[in-house]
Image (tube, rainbow, N blue to C red):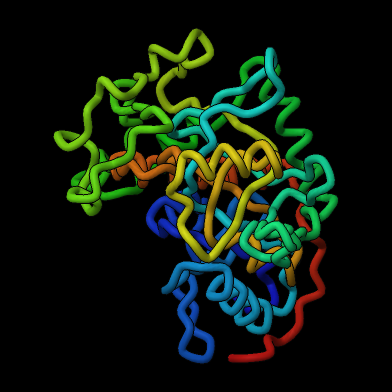
């Protein structure tokens, strides 16, 4: 296919899950020594890339190179994992996020859906006045999220369980288990004042952290129930930064101040210069505790939502032209 025939670009942090969503693979595409993966999802021709480095600057650079190489790109989807805010919303009407759930950027309050919370100006009191407000998602993508949210509230609900099953069929049998739902027993939320021991900072919590200082999913009320492969979808502001957010105290402060419901490290770099939507699977609670068991499954739930979203986004009518770079 010509480069100009691709209309959706996806920046993915877990390439296996992203590629497994394709209905048809077009193979590898090389432009100026950069490698991409092309394919089709529904009516859309999609080109995918994965960042070699984390951070908003690296994401901005990759998006610019992709936009230059593929001349008819209409939208970017930034798909990957993030740390979630376990509780958000007003008292008495709080929502809860659990591992494996999906967060989608949507304008909330005075913000456009993605907030670069480490960007701004220092004021006299020694506080950072946040100045990293970004534009919201393009109207067609925002309309599609609204439509999908409405469909999910009706029977039969989301198609994500079926999409995840089909994805795993495409993954080698020795790797399939890594993309399975780890289940509620592997979902623990540690108390805000209990930090991961610095001596085990490069290791998971299992065997190193005191589970008595945590809540299991079953201890967080009836809202915690999730059927296998059926994550809840949350919409709101996403915090984006070049620094990992690993403080439960800071997580709570930013949620209360900016209404962010998850934290990641790429979205702001893309959405500042390109029409984009950020989609994140939740793999931890954005605190000091580590649990790598959820990372690949969370990447899969985000990729599955992206695929379902594209099923309700109208395909662009293209005028085919020669690519800028062959």
* Percent of width and height locating residue 95: 62, 22
Quadrant where the N terminus sits is bottom right
- Which quadrant: the C terminus? bottom right
Say which quarter of the image contains residue 227: top left
On the rendered structure, is 147 left or right of 156?
right
Residue in front for this viewpoint, 286 or 35: 286
Spot the residue most to the front. Answer: 125
Residue displayed at 49% across by 36% down? 163
Decide: is 205 above or below 1.
above
- The image shows residue 92 at horizontal and vertical percentages of 68, 13
Say if 125 sits above or below 225 in the image.
Answer: below
**In the rendered image, which quarter is residue 165 located in?**
top left
Residue drawn 53% across the image and 75% down it: 58
Identify the residue shown where x is 63% and y is 78%. Answer: 3
319 and 95: which one is in front? 95
Q: Is residue 168 left or right of residue 259?
A: left
Q: Position of residue 261 (x, y in %)?
A: 61, 39
Residue at the farthest top position: 222
Q: Nearer the viewer, residue 275 or 243?
A: 243
Classify residue 147 as left or right of residue 14.
right
Q: Residue at position x 70%, y 42% from top?
A: 257
């Amino acid at each position: 296919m010509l480069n100009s025939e691709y209309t959706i670009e996806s920046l993915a942090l877990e390439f296996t899950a992203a590629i497994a969503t394709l209905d048809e693979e077009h193979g590898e595409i090389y432009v100026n020594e950069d490698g991409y993966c092309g394919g089709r999802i529904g009516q859309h021709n999609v080109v995918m890339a994965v960042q070699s480095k984390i951070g908003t600057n690296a994401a901005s650079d990759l998006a610019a190179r992709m936009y230059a190489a593929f001349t008819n790109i209409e939208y970017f989807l930034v798909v990957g994992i993030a740390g979630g805010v376990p509780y958000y919303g007003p008292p008495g009407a709080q929502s809860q996020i659990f591992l494996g759930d999906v967060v989608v950027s949507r304008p909330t309050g005075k913000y456009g859906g993605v907030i670069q919370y480490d960007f701004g100006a220092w004021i006299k009191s020694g506080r950072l006045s946040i100045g990293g407000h970004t534009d919201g998602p393009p109207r067609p993508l925002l309309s599609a999220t609204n439509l999908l949210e409405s469909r999910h509230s009706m029977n039969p609900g989301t198609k994500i369980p079926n999409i995840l099953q089909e994805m795993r069929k495409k993954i080698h049998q020795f790797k399939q288990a890594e993309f399975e739902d780890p289940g509620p027993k592997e979902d623990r939320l540690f108390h805000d004042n209990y930090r991961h021991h610095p001596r085990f900072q490069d290791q998971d919590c299992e065997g190193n952290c005191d589970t008595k200082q945590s809540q299991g999913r079953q201890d967080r009320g009836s809202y915690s129930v999730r059927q296998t492969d059926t994550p809840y979808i949350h919409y709101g502001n996403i915090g984006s930064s070049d620094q990992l957010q690993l403080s439960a105290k800071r997580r709570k402060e930013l949620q209360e101040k900016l209404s962010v419901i998850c934290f990641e490290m790429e979205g702001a770099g893309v959405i500042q210069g390109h029409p984009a939507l950020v989609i994140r699977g939740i793999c931890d609670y954005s605190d000091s505790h580590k649990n790598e068991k959820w990372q690949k499954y969370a990447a899969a739930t985000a990729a599955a939502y992206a695929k379902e979203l594209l099923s309700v986004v109208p395909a662009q009518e293209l005028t085919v032209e020669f690519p800028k770079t062959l």
